């Protein structure tokens, strides 16, 4: 009876296991972006005042509502002013909607208070407290240019001097959102990316750069010798690398292989400082593709690199391209595998004649063993 019960239990568990393995995977929807409405084109939008010290360049519109004081001494504005007008008023209304949307997104992962040193993939993050960045925070879109990153603070956002937010693998500034239910401070010479939704004030200290938006619902924005850039979201940083090997297979003992790396720019942002490396081969040498010789990977260009290696065993290695587009480091990787045939004294056991040979050896050994037995008993 016990045996029968055990058998039934095993069959039941096996049925469940099979069901889990064969059941179709449930697709997890990607996080939707936050709709900015008419606030989308503003580099800076505030409730009370906007002030500036030193030479500052702002790319994008500037808006104030209900306040009207824009101290623009030293400001180079590549955009339109909307000071206490109907456009700024509607943008503020849309900002409130966007703020509430981003603040209400369910948190997917917890993060430390200091995000510096982290590499994060798309999602909604909260520290359960304030947020800060010391060093470098890397946002990895994993090849999806529509990947969304939302960071929710419970109070402030404060970055350290010389801190950075870097985007890799297709991540875009226009898909990064920071919810700050108090004030935000970007420290001296920091490099920041994304849309800041601050309930009160935003302070950008000397030399700090921002790619994105400074949106202060009820307070002021204070600038000091900064570069604030809110370009069209369609300006995509995308860099691709493919890797091929010739030949893809080698005889026993190995041989020489030539790897070819093709780097392309399918986006709309130019890239400088293009570097191609390989985790197992050096050097990787540029061959051709820079049509005008300016060292800039233009949209649509394809740059060719090669490297040569001698292999004695099957090998898979990784090629990596790193470049800078509009001040942001972007990277991509590609792999290639070269097989090397196995050598040895005996051929593949699947060959018919080897099977016959092996059977013959077995028969000889059995015959020898029989003779020994007969002698012992004879």
Image (tube, helix red, strand yellow):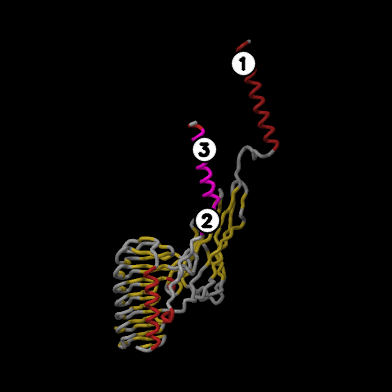
State the CA–CA distance, disc 3 to disc 2. Answer: 28 Å
Q: Which mark is residue 260?
A: none
Q: Give the residue at x 58% y 55%.
A: 257
- Which quadrant of the figure contains the C terminus? top right
State the CA–CA distance, disc 3 to disc 1. Answer: 50 Å
Number of other residues with Cα within 10 Å of mark 1, as a class: few under 14, some 14 to 19, many 20 or more? few
Does residue 352 lie above or below 164 as drawn?
Answer: above
Q: Are marks 3 and 1 in contact (CB under 8 Å)?
A: no
Does residue 61 lie above or below 178 as drawn?
Answer: below
Front one among 234 and 137? 234
Hey, which quadrant is residue 327 in on the image? bottom left
Query: Is 10 placed left or right of 76 in the picture?
Result: right
Which label sits in the foreground, 2 or 1?
2
Q: Is residue 284 visible?
A: yes
Instruction: Give the magenta part as a residue range.
Output: 4-26
Q: Earlier in the sequence, mark 3 or mark 1?
A: 3
Number of other residues with Cα within 10 Å of mark 2, as a class: few under 14, some 14 to 19, many 20 or more? few
Q: Residue furthest front?
A: 1
Magenta stretch, main secondary structure, is: helix
Q: Position of residue 168 (x, y in %)?
A: 45, 66
Q: Which mark is residue 373?
A: 1
Q: Which mark is residue 8?
A: 3
């Amino acid at each position: 009876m016990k045996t029968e019960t055990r058998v039934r239990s095993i069959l039941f568990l096996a049925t469940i296991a099979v069901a889990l393995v064969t059941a179709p995977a449930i697709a997890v929807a990607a996080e939707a972006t936050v709709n900015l409405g008419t606030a989308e084109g503003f580099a800076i939008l505030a409730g009370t005042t906007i002030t500036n010290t030193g030479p500052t360049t702002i790319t994008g519109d500037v808006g104030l509502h209900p306040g009207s004081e824009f101290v623009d001494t030293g400001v180079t504005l590549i955009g339109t002013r909307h000071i206490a007008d109907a456009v700024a008023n509607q943008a503020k209304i849309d900002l409130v909607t966007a703020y509430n949307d981003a603040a209400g997104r369910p948190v997917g992962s917890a993060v430390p208070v200091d995000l510096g040193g982290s590499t994060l993939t798309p999602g909604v993050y909260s520290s359960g407290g304030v947020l800060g960045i010391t060093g470098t925070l890397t946002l990895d879109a994993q090849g999806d240019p529509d990947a969304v990153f939302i960071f929710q603070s419970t109070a402030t956002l404060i970055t350290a001097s010389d801190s950075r937010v870097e985007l890799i693998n297709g991540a875009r500034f226009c898909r990064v959102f920071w919810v700050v239910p108090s004030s935000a401070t970007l420290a001296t010479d920091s490099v920041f990316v994304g849309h800041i939704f601050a309930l009160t004030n935003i302070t950008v200290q000397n030399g700090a750069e921002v790619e994105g938006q400074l949106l202060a619902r009820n307070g002021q924005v204070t600038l000091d010798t900064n570069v604030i850039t809110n370009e069209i979201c369609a300006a995509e940083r995308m860099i691709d690398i493919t890797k091929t090997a010739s030949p893809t297979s080698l005889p026993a003992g190995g041989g020489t292989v030539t790897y070819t790396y093709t780097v392309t720019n399918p986006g709309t942002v130019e890239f400088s400082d293009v570097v191609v490396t390989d985790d197992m081969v050096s050097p990787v040498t540029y061959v051709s593709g820079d049509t005008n010789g300016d060292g800039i990977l233009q949209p649509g260009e394809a740059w060719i690199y090669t490297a040569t290696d001698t292999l004695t065993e099957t090998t898979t290695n990784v090629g990596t391209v790193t470049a800078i587009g509009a001040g942001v480091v972007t990277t991509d990787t590609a792999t290639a595998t070269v097989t090397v045939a196995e050598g040895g004294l005996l051929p593949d056991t699947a060959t018919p004649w080897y099977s016959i040979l092996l059977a013959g050896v077995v028969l000889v050994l059995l015959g020898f063993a029989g003779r020994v037995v007969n002698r012992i008993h004879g």
